[in-house]
Structures are given as structure tokens and as C-alpha cells.
Image (cartoon, helix red, strand yellow):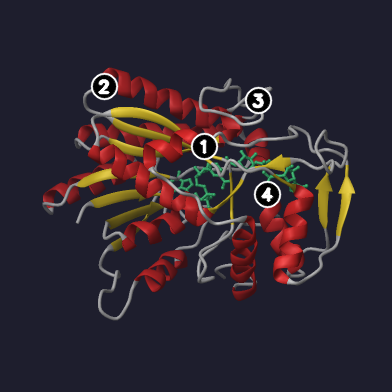
Amino acid sequence: MKRLLITGGSGFIGSHTCVVLLKQGYELYVLDSHCNSHPKVIDRVVKITGDEESSTINKVFLIEGDLRDQNLLNKLFSDSIYQGKPIEGVIHFAGLKSVQESTANPLLYWDSNVNGSINLLRSMDQFDCRTIVFSSSATIYGASKKSFLPETSPINPLNPYGQTKLAVEKLLRDVFKSSPNKWRISNLRYFNPIGAHSSGEIGEDPLGIPNNLFPFITQVAAGRREKLTIFGKDWPTLDGTCIRDYIHVMDLAEGHLLALECLLAEEPQLMNLNLGTGLGTSVLELVNTFQSVNNLEMPYEFASRRKGDVPQIIADNSMALSRLHWNPSRNLEDMCRDGWKWQTLNPKGYL
Ligand code: NAD
Ligand code: WQD
């Protein structure tokens, strides 16, 4: 079976994608510095995917290291060739993702996200591996009058994190243009991934106080935080709170498998694809669904709008649906149920 390199495979989205890829029979090299994750994640991935007859324990190799270590990357690619099993594709999740932290420390973000990606592409080129799926983000889109954002929407990231995602997309475009008959590239622009694997074995495990809404909700419900603060109740939406396109992390993970297989099957190309459900949910709707599905109540209060927020972001996902034959089928209830199961089974995350 094909061998893949998964950078950032111990992280939230990467670990769920490893489950999908292992179930499909791929062999994985996971490279992760664990600056924002725990190595235990991979044991859980093996637990979910292994069964008594066909254990996946010999199909996933965890390498702790940083993308900015060019020698390490070269060694991974060259060792694979030496073993007669070259790395045939890369799914590139590794990167830092906090908008707030990127504003405070842009050098760290440009170094990790952009220099790390340059190193990766350099090694890939050197060792003739030219298929890559990149974790981009809907955060690169600027203000738009359209209700649903297609891939052709105006691009204008508002913070250093978003700038680094756009910079890597531009880098990938230049690399593709330099040898269009060799590279296979997919930029997947995620909307708001939430939820967890239905087993409750893996999920989102943010360090410190969560920046994002969903892990904050689960931690308040679990009593780890006192209450949720909802930023703004005067937005121009039906209930006054912001609308986002929340997508179950397992649907997102399946999108990666399909994007990779599409690249491997087709002619060299570069594609930009939105991975979202195409459905909008307000903050209050998410809170209410979480409470009713899980039969609990949680304290929340309203505060003023958060700087940098926009009232509505929803994907036009028609391109991903048709190009990949992707079917994001899990609904908001599934996201809330699975995310809560992960939280209750792992009150302190992977610790
Ligand atoms: P995550 O932090 O859980 O996973 C990222 C992983 O990369 C972590 O395990 C971290 O330890 C590792 N890592 C970071 N820098 C590294 C480096 N220089 N070398 C090696 N490993 C490194 O984040 P996630 O939510 O799983 O996101 C995965 C990717 O998707 C990121 O690139 C992120 O920017 C992007 N993305 C995430 C979201 C989201 O809301 N979660 C939305 C859009 C895009
Ligand atoms: C969702 C809504 C908040 C926390 C971010 C990144 C984006 C992408 C996905 C990586 C907003 C409200 C939040 C809270 C709240 N990540 N909220 N109370 O801002 O849509 O996107 O994650 O690429 O780049 O910016 O997600 O989960 O932070 O916020 O009321 O404590 O929840 O105001 O309306 P966002 P989010």
C-alpha cells in the first residue's frame, strides 16, 4: 500500500485524517513537533483503527521533529526510497493556528508556517514526491457581499495567521507554475471544524484557554470554565449572533482522503477547494443544540463584539462536492454529541 507523509498528524484534524487513511490501508509517516499536541494521540489512532486480525500498529510511524529541520525531512524521504517504499504524497497539516498569538508574535508564525512549508517543498522536490494536500483556511477570504463564499471570492486575510496561509498558497502556485506537468496540489480551505471521532478516543485538545467557540463550550459544560461569553448580540443576523459554517472533523478528514486520491488519479494540477457544509449556524443555535442534544444546561453571557469578527461566513462547497464526490453528511447534532463524548471521556484531554 502507498506510503504517505502526514505533517502535523498528531493534531486535531491530522489525527482524525490518520484514522481515515489507515482504514483505507495507507501506511503513514507522521511528523509532528508536538508543540500543540500529545504523542499519545497516535496510540489512540491505532486503537481506533486496529482490530485483532489486522492491527495498524505497523502501518503508522511517529517521528517527533520540526518541519524547519531540513536534514530530518531529507532523511525521511531518502530512507523511504532506500527501503524501496518512497513517500508518494504529503498531507501538510503542521502549522500554528492561533489568530491572537500570530498578531502578538508574527515572526514565529511566518517562520513555522512559511519557512516550514518551504523546507517541506524543497525536500519533496529533491526526492521526486510532488503530490501535496495543504491545510489552508477560509480565513484568507476578505469581506464579500455574497452569502456563500466560492473559491473565487476576494482574498484579503486580516491577521498574520491568515497572511501565512495565503503566503503558502502563493508559494504553491509558483511551484506549480514552475513545473505544471509534475506537481499535484490541493489547497483545502477549511471553514469551522468541530466535533470528534464518534468513539470519543480522539478530539480537540487545546492548550490553555481555548480561542475557538466549540472547545470553549465543551469546557464550560464540563465545569472546567465558569461560563461562555458570546461576543455580540447585535450582529445583522436573525438572532443577533454571528453565523459560521461548522463542519464535523470526520467529514473534513474524509475530504482529505478524497482530495489525495483525486490528485493521484488525475493529471498534474492545482486545485483550491472549500471544505464546509454550506450551512450556516449562529452562536446561539450552536449553544442551544449542544444543550438539547446532550441534555444539559450551561451558563453564558453576552459581551461586546470581538475585534476582527464578521457577521457571517458560509462556504459555497459546490466545487468540492462535484470534484471529489464528497458528501459531508454529519449534522450539527452529531458534531455536538461527538464533541461532548470526547470531552466527558477525556476531561483533561490527553493528559
Ligand atoms: P493542531 O494545532 O491541532 O495541529 C497542528 C499540528 O502541527 C500540531 O500537532 C502541532 O504540534 C504540529 N506542528 C505545528 N508546527 C509544527 C512544525 N513547525 N513542525 C512540526 N509540527 C508542527 O491544529 P489543527 O486544528 O489540527 O489544524 C491543522 C491545520 O489546519 C493547521 O495548519 C491549521 O492552520 C489549519 N486550519 C485549522 C482550522 C481549525 O479551525 N482547526 C481551520 C482552518 C485551517
Ligand atoms: C466562532 C464564533 C465568535 C469564542 C477561527 C479562525 C479561523 C479558522 C477557524 C483556522 C465567532 C464566537 C467565539 C467565544 C464567542 N481557524 N465566539 N465566544 O473566528 O470563525 O474562525 O477558527 O484557520 O482562522 O479565525 O471561529 O470558533 O473563534 O468563533 O462568542 O468564546 O463564535 O465571535 O462569531 P472563527 P471561532
The tag on residue 99 is: none
Question: Mark 3 or mark 2, which has the lower sequence index?
Answer: 3
Q: What residue is shown with label 2?
A: 180
| Label 1 Cα crowd, 10 Å radius (few <14 / some 14-19 / many 20+) | many
User: Which amino acid type corresponds to the residue marked 1 in the rendered image?
Assistant: Asn
Q: Are marks 2 and 4 in contact (CB under 8 Å)?
A: no
User: Which amino acid type corresponds to the residue marked 2 in the rendered image?
Assistant: Pro
Disc 2 to disc 4, C-alpha distance: 38 Å
| Label 4 Cα crowd, 10 Å radius (few <14 / some 14-19 / many 20+) | few
The tag on residue 317 is: 1
Question: Mark 1 or mark 3, which has the lower sequence index?
Answer: 3
Along the line of sight, the residue nearer the viewer: 348 or 51: 51
Q: What residue is shown with label 4?
A: 212
Question: Mark 2 or mark 4, which has the lower sequence index?
Answer: 2
| Residue lying furthest bottom | 52
User: Which amino acid type corresponds to the residue marked 4 in the rendered image?
Assistant: Asn
Name the side, left or right, on which 127 lies relative to 199: left
